[in-house]
Amino acid sequence: MNYQEFQKTIDISKDHLYREIYLANRDQIQVKKEKTVIRNLSRIFNAALKISNEKGFQAMSMRDLSRETGLSMGGLYAYFSGKEDLLEMLLRTGRTTTQHILGAQLKPVTDPAARLRVAIRAHIFLSEVLQPWFYFSSMQARHLAPGHREEAKASELETERLFMDIIEQGRTRGLFAVEDSLLTASVIKAMVQDWYVKRWKYAKRKVSVDQYASFVVSCVEGFCLRRERGAGSTGTL
Amino acid sequence: MNYQEFQKTIDISKDHLYREIYLANRDQIQVKKEKTVIRNLSRIFNAALKISNEKGFQAMSMRDLSRETGLSMGGLYAYFSGKEDLLEMLLRTGRTTTQHILGAQLKPVTDPAARLRVAIRAHIFLSEVLQPWFYFSSMQARHLAPGHREEAKASELETERLFMDIIEQGRTRGLFAVEDSLLTASVIKAMVQDWYVKRWKYAKRKVSVDQYASFVVSCVEGFCLRRERGAGSTGTL
DNA sequence: GTCTATATACGGATAGAC
DNA sequence: GTCTATCCGTATATAGAC
């Protein structure tokens, strides 16, 4: 599966995404007309991600957000109860969307080697579709109030757990030769994360998302494969 | 070389570090007595790193810094001309110290395989010694004013360049089998970076810096080694 | 060399008009 | 549903005492 195919298999059009956000938050939003809410939520989130990813969420003032969205300060507060609340909505949306889509991608795949490949590619492709969200989450999750921080850490560990379980499964079946499946999962996560955290770098070098995903898969092949299987092969993975 | 040995080879005692900072900045510091400057710079940097790494540099107020250092607000301004200036000093110190020490570690090593191993280990070990600095830099470099941001990006690319040059050298001599040396350098950098960015994770799992460094080296072995050299070996690297 | 006190601006948030 | 006007706390930075 390449990036284009991935995009087709998921319904992650902007409209759909913001409708989901609307449904998840409509009880705490004062405005009631669906169309209005979706339009303005879309403006607010796009603006918030844009400004925060440039100078940090803390440094983004409500006045900045007002200017960028075209809504007044007062108007903004009809959609969230405060800056803290906006932050939480942004993080929560990213988390749930990710879980939802990755789960769906992995569900039909059972073979460990294929599962690992799909998990890596789907993760990278999804981070490409939702790049501002992924970048935002990885940058802001560290500076949260203790309660929310634990949630963020838990989410990070869950992703790793997903990789680790697949590796363990492959090891049990004698497909992978891995010393430490948790550390292996960690470095896979690190490589995946580099794509959306350092995107300016890859853009500058004109590395496409397909190239990057294939490269990561081949790296993982290199150190997950049973070496005994012989030399120079394309391998099991 | 393990971590303990690394620590012995470099003179990175706190006193030494803060004396270097003093020498690099003494012309723009109003206070003139060396002993006083070093003592207070040490307090200021330690406090600034501690607070910023918890809640972000932007969110750290001068009042926070005053409380944590024991110096008054007014007193602080004898050491830097403003918050922006303090940020620049922090980033610059981290950069120059890193360049200085990594350069020294690599200088005597000529064999590509050994150089790559040393570059990886030294980088990880150094990031352990200077953990708050490395973490701070990677978190704050993104939210800089355009001018400083370019410096930060250049520094990132330089590190990668260092890895890439070694890999190229090894490839030329037929020691490494690498498809794309720049992408390979990128993922090595990503793995190295994970150590100091996600340190809470590794601390929780009781993974030592020696374990992590060895693991990364073995990963790199896995996908840099010429596969034709045979199976299950410890390899050239 | 360091402190206290203060100038001045900007932050988030809300009340009430339309 | 959205805007304008405004409250009030807190921010950075400095002036001048000690």
Image (cartoon, coloured by chain):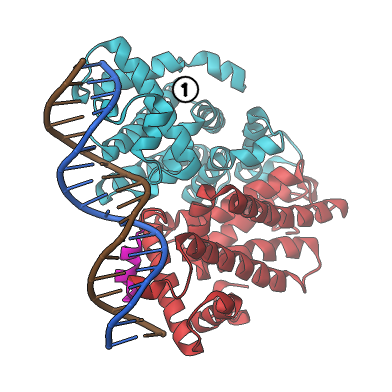
Chain colours: A red, B cyan, C blue, D brown
- Compared across the picture, whether A139 is left or right of A157 comes to left
Q: Is residue C15 above or below residue B178?
A: below
**Quadrant of the frame with the N terminus of chain B:** top right
Q: Provide residue B235's location: percent of width, then percent of height.
A: 68, 34
Q: Which residue is located at x 66 percent, y 35 percent?
A: B203
- Compared across the picture, whether A46 is left or right of A166 comes to left
Q: Provide residue B143's location: percent of width, then percent of height.
A: 36, 50
Q: Is residue B161 above or below residue A4?
A: above
Residue B22 lies in quadrant: top left
- Compared across the picture, whether B234 is left or right of B159 comes to right
Residue A64 lies in magenta, yes or no?
yes
Q: Provide residue A76's location: percent of width, then percent of height.
A: 40, 72
Q: How many marks?
A: 1
Relative depth, front residue between A105 and D5: D5
**Quadrant of the frame with the C terminus of chain B:** top right
Relative depth, front residue between B192 and B201: B201
Main secondary structure of the magenta stretch: helix
- What residue did someone put label 1 on? B105
Residue A49 lies in magenta, yes or no?
no
Q: Provide residue A150's location: percent of width, then percent of height.
A: 64, 50
**Does residue A192 show up?**
yes
**Does residue B98 show up?**
no
Q: Which residue is located at x 74 percent, y 51 percent?
A: A225
Q: Which residue is located at x 75 percent, y 52 percent?
A: A164
Q: Is residue A212 above or below residue B22?
A: below
Residue B33 lies in quadrant: top left
Read off the magenta span: A60-72
Q: Chain of mark 1?
A: B
**Furthest residue to the right?**
A173
Circle 1: element type: helix
Report the amino acid beneath label 1: Gln
